[in-house]
Image (cartoon, rainbow, N blue to C red):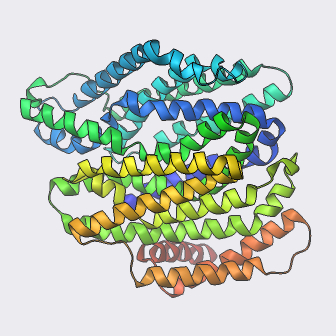
Amino acid sequence: MGIIKRQSIKQSIVSYAAVGVAAISTVFIYPLEKEMYGLAAFILSLAQFWAPFILLGLNGVSIRFFPQFRHESKNGQGFLFFLMAGVAAGSFIFVLLWGVFGDEVRSFYEDRPRIYQQFFPHAIALAILMAFFSLLSVYASNFKRIVVPAIMQNLIRFSLPTLILLFYYQKVLAEGIVVGVVLTYVLALILATGYLRWLGELKWKPDFSWFTAERKREIRVYALFSLLGGLDSIFIIHIDNIMVSSMLDFQSNGAYAIAAFIGNAIAIPALAVLRITAPIISDSFRRNDLAHIGQLYKQTSINLLLAGLFLLICIVVSIEDLFSIMPKSEEMAGGFMIVLLIGLGRIIDMGASTNGLIISYSKYFKFSIVGLFALAAFNIIANYLFIPQYKIVGAALGTVGALAFFNLVKLIFIWWKFKWQPFTLQTVYLLIIAGTTFLLAWNMPVTGIAVVDMVLRSVLVALVYVPSIYYFKISEDVNGLIKNVLEQVRAILK
């Protein structure tokens, strides 16, 4: 877990620095223009929804087959040439399909304001940029490099609030916001390409001899199932913004996106850990080192649960105070329930550990399609049932239900095929510690001053939670990290 721990911690630091900026934006900037923020979230979600179909499953291929290519190819990293050519082909096919079926999509919004249809071309361009950037970012993880791509991926955290402020002060129109978002990903793609070149891994010379007929067939099959299996996050995260915007309005989507951002912040450690763990699991399957994968399954679960529960407690006990200091806070009705529900969904997902990666990189990767159809059906039906009745809270209900159902299916499948499950007795102890910490923080006396109460509650959570997990040795990795910090502090104080 050494390199996983180092790279994950570094990426988490980068991500939380960006989240710090995004949190300030969420509290003080986005509420000023919820409609425009809802528009931006709608365009970003559309692009994120389309990007996997442009990628054609090649981001999964880049991890699954890279160990083989690197060991067997004569020309080093020519693998990247084939991957980029595949995404270019996917972009061309997608544009052609939009030319044929685009009118059908636009007709769905014919009774809505023109702004709903105005920015579809921008969303297509954004989806293509996201696809290329995602491929380069995932490809860099093969070299255990995830921190710098994470910085590039978070550029939108800085550009979007700037664009919303420019609109608020009447310096740009709605089109300026959308164009600015697109240009942000143009910059990210340029930087990602330059980073691979700096690493010395931007090598284009193809090695056609490696692509035997059998291997091409294997790649095509895996790419198809990687594409389908990779849609799970789309149906969990981005379908909500699309459906809330389509069934309600951009104003509602802006409020939902603000609350959902806070709930989803809990998952940031998981993004870092899973990104660096993916190529390790892929290589372990190649070497048939199943014991190592089983060990990672448990270690990752307890570490992610530990981090996620700490963040969930800090957020939930202070969220009402946070909403109270937002501009136009009266428009955040239902925000507490959205944060709580999405946060619980993320805890379920983090506790389930690397189950998706294990299935994707094992010989049972075709099962991903079963899970995807179950997830898609559950989430879409739940949203159609809940959003009209419960408005934006209904979207959060659909999300937590989908996460719970989807992870249960994957947990059962992995137990059936490998006899692995991610939970231990330490998981039970951790849940007890988390529950106790939450009750203490929730019932502590308050001053009535929102900022002061948020700080006091967070300090109480840290003072109870961190020593408890250390004393009960919940995680060897976390205990080792705490010991290192304490040793450095002692050295400074000597």
Among the 4 quarters of the image, the one containing residue 461: bottom right
Image point (35%, 55%), residue name:
356
Which quadrant of the structure image shows residue 141?
Answer: top left
- Place of residue 392 in the rendered image (x, y in percent of width and height, measured from the top left): 70, 49
The residue under the point 24% across, 25% down is 82
Left/right placement of residue 475 relative to residue 434 reads left
Residue plotted at (83% across, 62% down) = 321
Kindly indicate the quadrant of the structure image that contains residue 69.
top left
Q: Residue 262 location in percent, x, y?
A: 67, 54
Q: Percent position (x, y) of residue 66?
A: 23, 40
Give whichever of 485, 343 is nearer the camera: 343
Is 151 rendered above or below residue 11?
above
On the picture, is 361 further left or further right than 190?
left
Which quarter of the image is occupied by the C terminus?
A: bottom right
Q: Nearer the viewer, residue 490 or 480?
A: 480
Horizontal relation, residue 397 to residue 299: left or right: right
Above or below 67: residue 126: above
Q: Position of residue 47 (x, y in %)?
A: 52, 30
Quadrant placement of the N terminus: bottom left
